Amino acid sequence: MRIDIITVLPELLESPFSHSMMKRAQSKGLLEVHLHNLRKWAVNEYGQVDDYQYGGGAGMVMMCEPLVNATEELSTQRRYDEIIYLTPDGNMLDQKTANYFSLKENLLVICGHYKGVDERIREHFVTKEISIGDYVLSGGELAAAVLVDAIGRLIPGVLNDETSALFDSFQDNLVAPPVYTRPADFRGWKVPDILLSGDPKKIDDWRQEQSLRRTHERRPGLLKGDE
Ligand code: 6GU
């Protein structure tokens, strides 16, 4: 999979993709992330990419021309399966959406800034609008880092133990069961006996039951299907 990201702050996104799982995905050749500085398509030598909004009011708006030129230039090199705009009023990112994107070949991600992008970009170019939660970030870059991480780890072959994504929280609309590691007794706080039993069937059943119980307690909406 290849992900192209258009941003006014490429520096902010260098580190999140240079470590751990995202680094491994890229060095295995399973994921390519390319950062594009929108200022390369600025409308003048001052690097202008935003302007005052029509109708007045505080805050700048990202202009059509740089975004259209960037999108069109990148689109001559490959056909994008989706052009994603990151915005707090987009559809909420969830595991199902991450699964959906992880099956694509080429994604183009546009990071919003300031008051957002000129509406005409959304009407004519963007195919999916995504938010990462009901709070406002100062720009789409951190949301892009979250989105790419959530997608990237789902690409087959990225995770060490290929089956492990299957047991993630939310993968079956359930949250994950509790986990423990050594020692079996720490300050008298004991690991549940069943996990030490060596009986894989019993352990599986226990984990399933814990997942269900936790989902009931913490995220009942997931079970009712209204989340
Ligand atoms: Cl995608 N962008 C911004 N600026 N704020 C957000 C967001 C995105 N998702 C939640 N808050």
Image (cartoon, grey):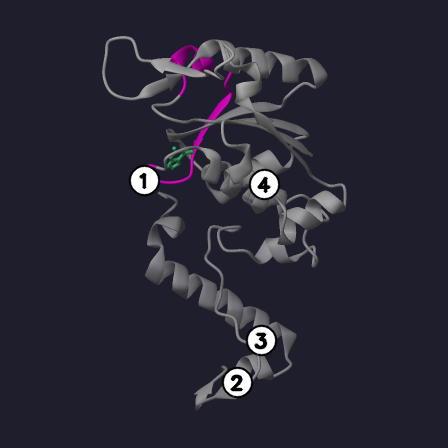
The mark found on residue 97 in the picture is none
* Residue identifier under label 2: 193
Q: Which residues are magenta?
A: 117-136
* Residue identifier under label 3: 202
Of tags 3 and 1, which is closer to the observer?
1
**Left or right for 137, reference 94:** left
Q: Residue at coordinates 54% horizontally, 86% vertically from top-left?
A: 184
**Which element type, helix, strand or loop, lies under badge 4?**
helix
Q: Residue at coordinates 51% horizontally, 15% vertically from top-left?
A: 67
Q: Nearer the viewer, residue 13 or 151?
A: 13
- Which of the two discs, 2 and 4, labels the residue nearer the N terminus? 4
Q: Residue at coordinates 60% horizontally, 84% vertically from top-left?
A: 197
* Disc 1 residue crowd, few under 14, some 14–19, many 20+, Cα 10 Å: few
State the separation of the CA atoms marked 2 and 3.
Answer: 11 Å
State the separation of the CA atoms marked 4 and 3.
Answer: 44 Å
Farthest right residue?
A: 28
Q: Are marks 4 and 3 in contact (CB under 8 Å)?
A: no
The mark found on residue 135 in the picture is 1
Three-letter code, disc 1 = Tyr
x and y, in percent, of residue 177 in the image: 49, 66
Q: Residue at coordinates 39% horizontally, 52% vertically from top-left?
A: 223
